[in-house]
């Protein structure tokens, strides 16, 4: 498809607002897939299983599939809007063009907090994995904090040096992590002696749904963790060679990959571990490999867990820095953050600024709190998306501007997404009501700060940069 949404100035390496140095367009569909799946695949390796503790194994499966529907709606909506609004910032930039400044500011913060908390959770898992392996080797008592900080510093350095190397690295390690899940499934499915799964014994009687349908509702909270971050593909919009082709292809292929990986993960883990243990496991796939009795699987899933967490943290640094950079470029934040490195063509100041924040959260909060804060910020962002999509179609109908992708059945995906978000908010409130209220209060306070103070510094000329006709009705 033609790159109808890219100006000649951007093709020549200029920024979309007339800056001398812009981000570099070097990525293809495979990199977009690696960014989306790479961020999310760690959800199969850790975090999703807390939903088992909330409602049992079947509750986690139902939550997995309902969350899959939610994220399929997210992927379709993002594929249409972002293939048309091809600029860094993703949903922040969409909100800026379609709804207005206050919504854009909040959505930008949702993105940064969701990705930074997820990055911190990934670094925590790296430290936990190193600590566990060291304990298995007889070196118990090893501190995990140095490994947490080192992993964040290494990935920040990689992001600093260039997006092509960063996402090519993600492509390789994400593929290895996904193949590891497939191999684990292939070696445990069916009746293979010591590798056989025990679903009938582990899920009989009350173990099937120990808390009834209320447990299913509570499990929806962690059902999102299977897919949280797939919307991060939108952050690559200003760095792909062909946004109209690469963004829809990479995003939709990514959500299909994740649904397959999530279902395989659930099947293996609930067949090898009692739900009481699975619900508190720090690294369930790695534990499943250990319980299979195969040393090969232990090594493979240890590598897969490490690669999945590194890929996710790597993608989170990429996405959080792009959202922060886009807000700085438009003066929603200090313009200092809107700088692009003259050699590496990366938003280097935004990358560096977010490093100590991620390190602080990773070393001071437990994993379930990090997961919850990331989910809450993501959930607030998903709640905005139905309104964004409906207004986008209303202001610019299909026959007024070209789109790289047109999602079907509008407005059904938007309405389904809104309904599932409402259900998930209630599910989060059941288990983490204090954190939910605290985060909403925080976003109200910063909204007031933006309205009464920061908005005076916003670059009003950068509010609308797409070469579109006047919105319908204006």
Image (cartoon, grey):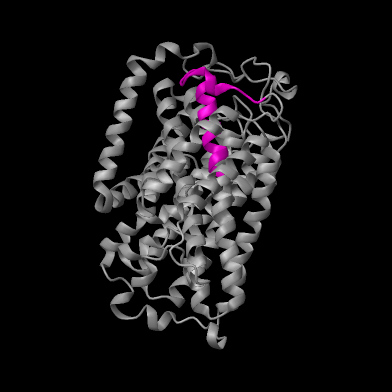
* Rendered position, 471 above or below 264: above
* Rendered position, 297 above or below 105: below
Magenta stretch: dominant secondary structure = helix
Q: Nearer the viewer, residue 334 or 153?
A: 153
Instruction: Locate the N terminus by quadrant.
Output: top right
**Residue depicted at 46% across the width and 51% down the height:** 145
Image spot of residue 133 (x, y percent): 52, 67
**Residue depicted at 43% across the width and 79% down the height:** 199
Q: Is residue 145 left or right of residue 398?
A: left
* Rendered position, 409 above or below 353: below
Q: Which residues are magenta?
A: 315-341
Does residue 292 appear anywhere in the picture?
Answer: yes
**Residue depicted at 43% across the width and 73% down the height:** 270
Image spot of residue 418 (x, y percent): 38, 42
Q: Quadrant of residue 104?
A: top left
User: Is 216 one of the magenta-colored residues?
Assistant: no
Q: Is residue 268 left or right of residue 173?
A: left
Q: Nearer the viewer, residue 341 or 149?
A: 149
**Residue depicted at 59% across the width and 44% down the height:** 155
Q: Is residue 210 left or right of residue 263?
A: left
User: Is 327 one of the magenta-colored residues?
Assistant: yes
Q: Quadrant of residue 4?
A: top right
Image spot of residue 130 (x, y percent): 52, 61
Image spot of residue 92 (x, y percent): 49, 29
Count of numbered badges drawn on the protein: 0
């Amino acid at each position: 498809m033609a790159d109808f949404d890219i100006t000649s100035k951007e093709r020549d390496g200029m920024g979309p607002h007339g800056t001398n140095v812009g981000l570099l367009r070097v990525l293809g569909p495979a990199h977009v897939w690696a960014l989306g799946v790479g961020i999310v695949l760690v959800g199969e390796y850790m975090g999703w299983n807390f939903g088992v503790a909330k409602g049992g194994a079947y509750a986690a499966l139902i939550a997995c599939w309902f969350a899959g529907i939610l994220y399929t709606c997210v992927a379709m909506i993002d594929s249409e809007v972002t293939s048309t609004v091809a600029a860094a910032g993703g949903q922040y930039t969409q909100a800026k063009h379609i709804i207005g400044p206050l919504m854009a500011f909040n959505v930008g913060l949702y993105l940064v907090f969701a990705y930074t908390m997820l990055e911190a959770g990934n670094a925590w898992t790296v430290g936990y994995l190193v600590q566990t392996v060291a304990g298995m080797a007889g070196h118990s008592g090893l501190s995990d904090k140095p490994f947490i900080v080192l992993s964040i510093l290494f990935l920040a350095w990689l992001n600093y040096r260039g997006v092509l190397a960063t996402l090519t690295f993600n492509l390789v390690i994400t593929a290895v992590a996904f193949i590891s899940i497939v191999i684990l499934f292939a070696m445990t499915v069916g009746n293979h002696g010591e590798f056989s799964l025990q679903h009938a014994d582990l899920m009989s009687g009350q173990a099937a749904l120990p808390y009834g349908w209320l447990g299913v509702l509570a499990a929806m909270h962690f059902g999102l963790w299977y897919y949280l971050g797939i919307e991060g593909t939108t952050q690559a919009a200003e760095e792909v060679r062909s946004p109209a082709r690469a963004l829809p292809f990479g995003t939709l292929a990514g959500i299909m990959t994740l649904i397959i990986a999530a279902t395989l993960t659930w099947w293996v883990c609930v067949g090898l571990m009692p739900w009481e243990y699975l619900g508190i496991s720090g690294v369930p796939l790695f534990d499943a490999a250990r319980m299979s009795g195969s040393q090969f699987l232990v090594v493979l899933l240890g590598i897969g867990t490490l690669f999945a967490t590194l890929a996710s943290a790597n993608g989170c640094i990429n996405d959080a820095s792009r959202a922060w950079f886009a807000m700085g470029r438009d003066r929603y934040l200090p313009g200092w953050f809107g700088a692009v490195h003259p050699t590496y063509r990366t938003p280097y100041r935004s990358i560096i600024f977010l490093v100590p924040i991620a390190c602080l959260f990773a070393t001071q909060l437990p994993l379930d709190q990090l997961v919850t804060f990331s989910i809450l910020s993501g959930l607030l962002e998903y709640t905005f998306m139905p309104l964004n999509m409906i207004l986008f179609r209303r202001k610019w109908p299909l026959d007024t501007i070209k789109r790289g992708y047109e999602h079907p059945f509008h407005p059904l995906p938007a309405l389904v997404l809104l309904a599932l978000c409402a259900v998930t908010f209630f599910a989060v409130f059941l288990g983490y009501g204090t954190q939910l209220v605290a985060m909403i209060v925080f976003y109200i306070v910063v909204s007031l700060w933006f309205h009464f103070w920061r908005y005076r510094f916003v670059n009003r000329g950068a509010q609308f940069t797409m070469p579109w006709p006047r919105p319908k009705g204006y």
